[in-house]
Image (cartoon, rainbow, N blue to C red):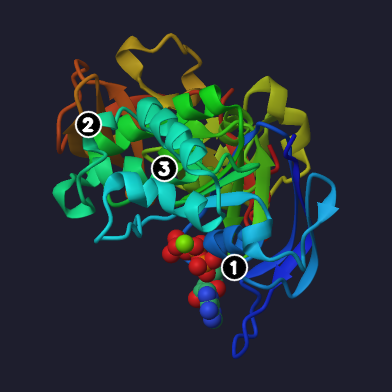
């Protein structure tokens, strides 16, 4: 059992009026894989370091297995942290690097050997045990750093951007390895990244942070489909959600979104709620995959169609990102690459109005 509870934890550094982490509350269940994600400086590493005990907490409580650990030394918290810069000892072999943490904790020699060999087998690095770090590739070094955490059999694994030094392909592979590792070790893992793809693919739950504040906590699908605000909506997803400024307009007994150069009729499901915003400024959010090419779209409502100039087409293999502009607003559609829009020509696209969002233009909170 290893449950981690953060109770309104806050971190203020001296000489900085803004908290690095503010009133953060989170319950991480036993065996859960939780990802903290957010832009640079949002407080991810600080949160992790507070859990590890490397950073004092200004206020609040941290509990590991129902025990308050605020004043427990890092070495007694039974957590293991894997950093971005592997921090391996250059003069030691891979074996000694992995064994080191156990040696200083005075584990018997044969127990150390058993654990190191077991970890080496899990990570597929048995052949590398006699090498030194500089004789390894980046990916291999990263596995040694993982091995060093695994041998400790900690209650909780903490990862701080462990893959960011790897190239794209290796990052993908190692990501899969860490997911497998989680399944095999059945351990509680807290993983920090600024990469939303990593967050979406790895996390049982994702915690989206900004400026020290938690924006939303949820499973990947919920975060993607029901973002709590415009920030989360724009942060998760590639290409990001399009935001279009406009007004809600009631006419002929129906509710429309008016951008200025085009209007779109709202879906039945949203009419009633959005009628209350008649005449008000609003932000429409639409993901690139919910803008379709008119010619092949199954959406036939003429009031969901607009015409826009094609600026750029980026083929990415199975799909193409098509950048469009109406003069006033620009947006990107993710379309099947075989469709036939042409650069510098007008094209007709359909917004899937069942899938759009609206955000309050002042507070940026999600309305729908
Ligand atoms: N020792 C420190 N003294 C003062 N301010 C600090 C200190 N460490 C971090 N900060 C500030 O706290 C805030 C959060 O930093 P943190 O390292 O947690 O961000 P992060 O989300 O991990 O960012 P990144 O993705 O760049 O690693 C930042 O504004 C940072 O400048
Ligand atoms: Mg960081």
Vertical side of 239 occupied by 365: above or below: below
Quarter placement of the C terminus: top right
x and y percent of residue 174 in the render?
A: 34, 34
Vertical side of 147 occupied by 264: above or below: above
Element under disc 2: helix
Tell me how far mark 2 sits from mark 3, CA to CA. Answer: 16 Å
> Which is more toward the observer, 365 or 1?
1
Quarter placement of the N terminus: top right
Judged left or right of residue 39, residue 340 is: left
Q: Which residue is mark 2?
A: 127
Q: Which residue is mark 3?
A: 146
Judged left or right of residue 8, residue 124 is: left
Tell me how far mark 1 sits from mark 3, CA to CA. Answer: 19 Å
Residue at the extreme bottom of the image, as rendered: 15
- The numbered dot on residue 140 is none
Res 213 visible: no
Mark 2 / mark 3, whichever is N-terminal? 2
Vertical side of 14 occupied by 203: above or below: above
Nearest to the eye among marks 2 and 1: give it.
2
- Where residue 326 sits, quadrant-wise, is top left
Residue depicted at x 30% and y 38% = 171
- The numbered dot on residue 54 is 1
């Amino acid at each position: 059992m290893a449950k981690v509870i953060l109770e309104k934890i806050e971190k203020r550094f001296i000489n900085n009026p803004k908290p690095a982490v503010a009133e953060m509350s989170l319950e991480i269940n036993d065996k859960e894989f939780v990802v903290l994600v957010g832009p640079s400086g949002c407080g991810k590493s600080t949160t992790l370091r507070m859990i590890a005990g490397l950073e004092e907490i200004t206020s609040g409580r941290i509990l590991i297995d129902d025990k308050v650990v605020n004043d427990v030394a890092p070495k007694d918290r039974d957590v293991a942290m894997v950093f971005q810069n592997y921090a391996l000892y250059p003069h030691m072999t891979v074996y000694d690097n992995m064994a080191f943490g156990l040696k200083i904790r005075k584990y018997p020699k044969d127990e150390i050997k058993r654990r190191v060999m077991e970890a080496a087998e899990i990570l597929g690095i048995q052949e590398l045990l006699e090498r030194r770090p500089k004789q390894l590739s980046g990916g291999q070094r990263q596995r040694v750093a993982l091995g060093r955490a695994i041998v400790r059999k900690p209650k909780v694994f903490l990862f701080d951007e462990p893959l960011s030094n790897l190239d794209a392909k290796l990052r993908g592979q190692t990501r899969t390895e860490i997911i497998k590792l989680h399944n095999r070790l059945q351990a509680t893992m807290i993983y920090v990244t600024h990469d939303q793809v990593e967050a979406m693919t790895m996390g049982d739950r994702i915690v989206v942070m900004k400026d020290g504040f938690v924006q939303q906590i949820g499973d990947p699908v919920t975060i993607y489909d029901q973002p709590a605000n415009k920030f989360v909506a724009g942060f998760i997803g590639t290409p990001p959600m399009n935001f279009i400024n406009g007004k809600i307009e009631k006419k002929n007994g129906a509710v429309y979104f008016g951008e200025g150069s085009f209007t779109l009729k709202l879906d039945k499901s949203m009419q009633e709620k959005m009628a209350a915003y008649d005449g008000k400024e609003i932000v429409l959010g639409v993901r690139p995959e919910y803008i379709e090419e008119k010619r092949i779209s199954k959406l036939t409502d003429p009031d969901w169609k607009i015409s826009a100039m094609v600026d750029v087409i980026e083929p990415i293999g199975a799909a193409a990102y098509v950048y469009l502009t109406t003069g006033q607003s620009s947006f990107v559609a993710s379309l099947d690459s075989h469709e036939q829009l042409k650069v510098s020509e007008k094209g007709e696209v359909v917004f899937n109005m069942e899938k759009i969002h609206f955000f309050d233009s002042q507070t940026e909170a999600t309305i729908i």
